[in-house]
Amino acid sequence: MELFESGWGLTLIVFLPLVGALVNMAIPKTNETAIKQWSLFVAVVTFVLSLVLVFTFDYANADRFQFEVNESWISAIGANFHLGVDGISLPLLVLSTFVMVLAIIYSWDHWEEPHNPRAFLSLMLILATGMNGTFVALDLVLFFIFFEVVLLPMYFMIGIWGDKSMRKIPGFAKEVETRLYASIKFFLFTLFGSAFMLLGFLALYFRSGDFGPRTFDIPELIQLGTSGAFSGTFAFLVFGAMFLGFAVKVPMWPLHTWLPDAHTAAPTVGSVLLAAILLKLGSYAFIRISIPILPQEAESWAPAIAVLSVIGIIYGSLACLAQTDMKRLIAFSSVGHMGFVMLGISTLTDVGINAAIIGMVAHGLITGMLFFVAGSMSHRYHTRDMARLGGNQKLMPVMGAILAFTAFASLGLPGLAGFWGEFMSLLGAYNPLESLRGEFLGLFRTAMVLGAIGTVLTAGYMLWMLQKVNLGEPGEEWIGHDFHDADRFELTAWVPMIILIVVIGFYPQVVFGATTDAVVSLVDTAFGEGAATTAAVVDVLGS
Amino acid sequence: MIVSQFLVIAAALFSLGVYGLLVRRNAVMILLAVELMLNAVNINLIAFESVIRSSQAVGQVFSIFVITVAAAEVGIGLAIVLLIFRNRRSANVDDFNLMKF
Amino acid sequence: MASRLILAAEAGAPDLVSGGFFAEWAGIMLVGPFVAFLLIVFFGKRLRHLGAEFAIGAMALNLVWASVLFVQNMSHGIFREVNVQIASIGVFDGRDLVFELGWVVDGLSIMMYFVVAFVGLLVFIYAVGYMKGDVRVTWFFASLSLFAGSMLILVGSPNLIQLIIGWEGVGLASYLLIGHYWEQKENSSAAMKAFYTNKVADVGLILGAILLGLAIGDFSFAAINEAAANHSEPLEAVAFAGGLLLFFGAMGKSAQFPLHIWLPDAMAGPTPVSALMHAATMVTAGIYLMARTFPVYQNLVGGEAAREWMVPIGVITLFAMGLLALVADDIKKVLAYSTVSQLGYMMTAVAAGGYTAGLFHLFTHAFFKALLFLGAGSVIHAVHSNNMSDMGGLRREMPRTFWTFVIGSLSLAGIIPLAGFFSKDEILATLDYEGYTAFMWVAIAGAFVTAFYMTRAVALTFFGTYKGHGHPHESPALMTVPLVLLAIPSVIAGFLNIPGVSSGNFGNFTTWVGARVVPMGDHHPEALDWTLAAYGLAAGGLGIAIGWLMFGRDAESQAQRDRFEVPVLYPLLRQKYYMDHLALGIVGFTKGPSARAVDWINTYIIDGIVNGVGGGVRLVGRFVYGTLDQRGIDMIFNGVSAGADTAGVALRKLQTGRVQQYAMGFVVGALVLVLAIAVFN
């Protein structure tokens, strides 16, 4: 335990998957069972380690970084190997290790062509290192590296195991393979954002030299930032640069167009990880980096973020209504749901940021589940075209019930995890941060109303999808086919998620227990003592 | 000490090298021309060092570096030329444009 | 009618006790059905009645529990609240802003527990008979249990958050049960429509909850109501908007005009579902919400202003929707429109300030409307059709169903001394006292319409000769016993709240539901006002009489009976006085143009708007996706990459692959640089 707390715990959680991936390479390619068992073992150990983290975490001091390790790394530029976890990152870290275990269980006998479990599992483990690392990195260089490490495995997963159909892309002369188009688009988009993000990081690094030794250290930069070190046009541009990097990943409207393609083309497990974890890296970065380091800029950017989020909510839902491809519909629903997350963040209040975190966790579980089910279904039907599907409830009762459950969770049914994120981000938008209440109160409250209307649209497309896919009589072409219902690997992977969705739905304190103190202290340090109060605004809507 | 003589000689050598690089068609001769250019640089380095006399003998050190790199370069270059010759029965650079897209 | 005595609202906090064991552990009632749900899903198929046992067991326990509480509350008002914090989400004025789950036991919730458990248990038992041989009995009872649990979560909620959970939970159960036969598209569409309409209304509920909750930093009803009773400044600021938003939420669940459209379609579900959810309990959730937050509407200026908007909506609902029941052939649709109309009565009463009046009507209506639906179900079970054109003369074959149905109809029509008479009378008295005289007359006219359409339904179903196929038989005891058990309260429930009559220690309905943490401050009559009662009775009697005259007679076909222009009727009425003539005109207008106009408006305008909005939204969606997204935003990004592609094609010509050409480029470039330096230095 001593060792664990002195920093080895986090280091292990981050790098164990990478080591696992390397060991995988040493196992003969033909011995698939050994590869699968080993990968699962590594993922389970990582998950158990993160559980140890959960149970030894000091919740009374959730606002402080714990299990910290801070070693000199590249001394020439002052980059440190600085890891640590606080109440904000803890739930996301656990989500990441948890989903990884389930993804490996699910993929046990669900392999897309060209098969090759060794390569696939190794990529997944490398991905795990990147994701876990991003959530615990407390140094901008380290953060950047982990943030980028995530790209490569996902690029290969989409590009190699993805959808092999040909697609006509407007603007291009020839038809292109969906997987190639999607993977390259995903890679370039994210890289485009990352370039700006890196610029922002470097700018912070050099500017921090004005106030002492230059540093990439996030806690130190937060201290500088809250004491007002970064201001003016400089800070505005830096925030903008980082915004680009993070917003692409979230993705925020209008930088979202990589997402439907990537999700649709990716193999099932790829979509799941993409939705469950990768999208959270961006919104997490907003909370971890942008807001506390550049609080004043966060205030001036907040209305714009709110507007973009609300556009994302409405726009994503409307786009969903036009889809014929089930996976694409779910992908677009992510745009809407992440809109709620960003709306919560844009309010800069404790309630709003809390909403964002629980929204992230819930979206990770629920949309992850949706992609699991959609993947399993397209595995069986060999189509994702909703016009051809129908009567799934009759052909596969268990799968249909799980799809219905997840769809209801996704439309934000109270009592399931998805509700809290939506409800609380509206709650936050009603009373944004004090300094935003002046000229922007109307804007945020309009955002609240539009967000609430967005929930109606969400319900609309989810019910519509259910009706098309699940209800009614099965189509002619499926009669006589023998569909096997959810198998044991699928159920093993899904049941824990379902249970968690219900548990968080009825007892969200499992998330807030870790986050609330950390969020309150984040808001207090960023915007001054006592800023984290949703005090009453004595005026009516609009007046 | 007057440097200019050395510089003139180096410039002459370098120009010869450039000339050789551009007009020769035989790959071996092109490599030789590159060597000429590198050695012109070496002369420059040593000449300047003799004027500046830095404490760490930077000029000499760098010229040794250049010599090493040149040796390595010739080694790899000749190997490539040899392979191409074996495959194409020719060492004439006009005959191959492998690097065209 | 100014002579009527009306008691002033009682002042001071009511004297309440904590209620002991049963109140302390009332949460067991809330959890029981969920446990039953899980048991049914996992083990139901192995049992003889396919899981109905669990559902009935849980409901029976609930009924016992609720009855004990009900009796306890009679002798001394109970208030007990148990809360478990489920989330602390931030800071509000130095305090933690928290979400809680728990249960509240007070006069209002006890009444609702009792209604849900009583009607629920009888409907469950009935459903065992009704659903015998159905394709999905197990799932049916699982969903019913899910509904019962959600409904209890809703009515037992001590705060707005839990209420929202229960609220959408019953919506989900409603979706599942309306779409029970989801193989047919119209059923799944009806289910969608119900869920969706409610989801639209929920926007109001959620925003209203945010407004009220964030005004005082507490979502609990006790805190909100106390703040309202103390005229809290921040609450006053949002009372109008918050009150109307909550009301908008209630309009969806309680099917108020114009959000009533889902309820008639909801009849696609099996009849027990209609009886329990779409008549007795779920649809009253909106009324319950208004009653739960009544102090906000009663004590705050903004709340009172909001009520001014609520009353007309209730009145329109009660009258216009009643008319629609006149033209429906589907017996369940008749009852559905009737339910909407009665919900309008309740809403009108609560909105006008009659807390007790509205709740009392909710209470009695639950019994007789559940009875009517179950009776209709019994008939449908026998004739295998929902349409009255396939019925007729069933009173001989189905005597128990007939008599209980008649009792329910008379009660609904407000005939003394059945339950409906007293509850409707109290609503009229409230409207009169609060000064809504014009609306009171509309309500009386509504009573006429109610009696009229119920008479039509009874006549077409049970009188005349049988026009359907096969030989209908009385339903099994499993179905008729619940009918009888529901008929009893349909007759006697009214005596629980005869104005001025209070049975010593036990008080009456008014004091029972008045056991709230703050006094509700509504007004109730001290004695029965016979003038008003006479108007109500006359309207009801007239409705029955005219209805009987028009539909009582048998004819060749039901369609001939079910027509206003029955040739025999005309001369008969012509011999009567002017009044009859007028009545006939009214009836003709009511049944003919006006009902049809309302029906037309309903079908083509309101439904049209809804369908149009639905379709429109799809179109907008297609536009956003096809034009804006794929050809707009995505085109920009694709354009950039396609541009890079084209540029590459052009530029690659420069790449000859001849090393010496490249070298030439270097040299020329270097020379240019050298020259440039030479020139510019």
Image (cartoon, helix red, strand yellow):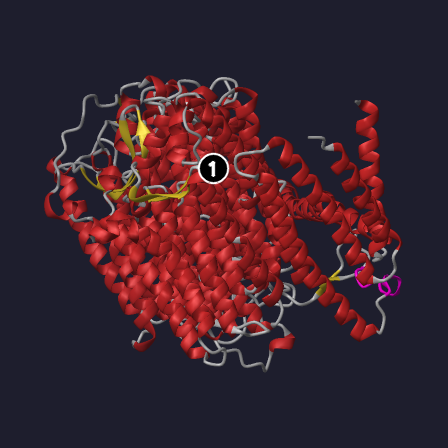
* Tally of numbered discs: 1
Please indicate whether residue A259 sits to the left or right of residue C305 in the image.
right
Residue A163 is a magenta residue: no
- Is residue C443 something one can see in this rendering? no
Snapshot quadrant of residue C351: top left
- Is residue C404 something one can see in this rendering? yes
Marked residue chain, label 1: A
| Residue lying at 33% horizontally and 32% vertically, measured from the top left | A520
Q: Which residue is mark 1?
A: A286
Main secondary structure type of the part rendered in magenta: loop
Relative depth, front residue between C419 and A375: A375
Relative depth, front residue between C81 and B29: B29
Instruction: Give, as a single range, the part of the protein colored magenta.
Output: B92-101
| Residue lying at 45% horizontally and 73% vertically, measured from the top left | A26
Relative depth, front residue between A31 and A209: A209
| A76 over C571 or under it: above or below | above
| C562 over A137 or under it: above or below | below
Amino acid marked by disc 1: Phe
Q: Position of residue C435 (x, y in %)?
A: 41, 21
Q: Quadrant of the C terminus of chain C?
A: top right
| C71 over A168 or under it: above or below | above
Residues packed near mark 1 inside 10 Å, few (<14), some (14 to 19) or many (20 plus):
many
Q: Quadrant of the N terminus of chain C?
A: top left
Residue B98 is a magenta residue: yes
| Residue lying at 80% horizontally and 33% vertically, measured from the top left | C674
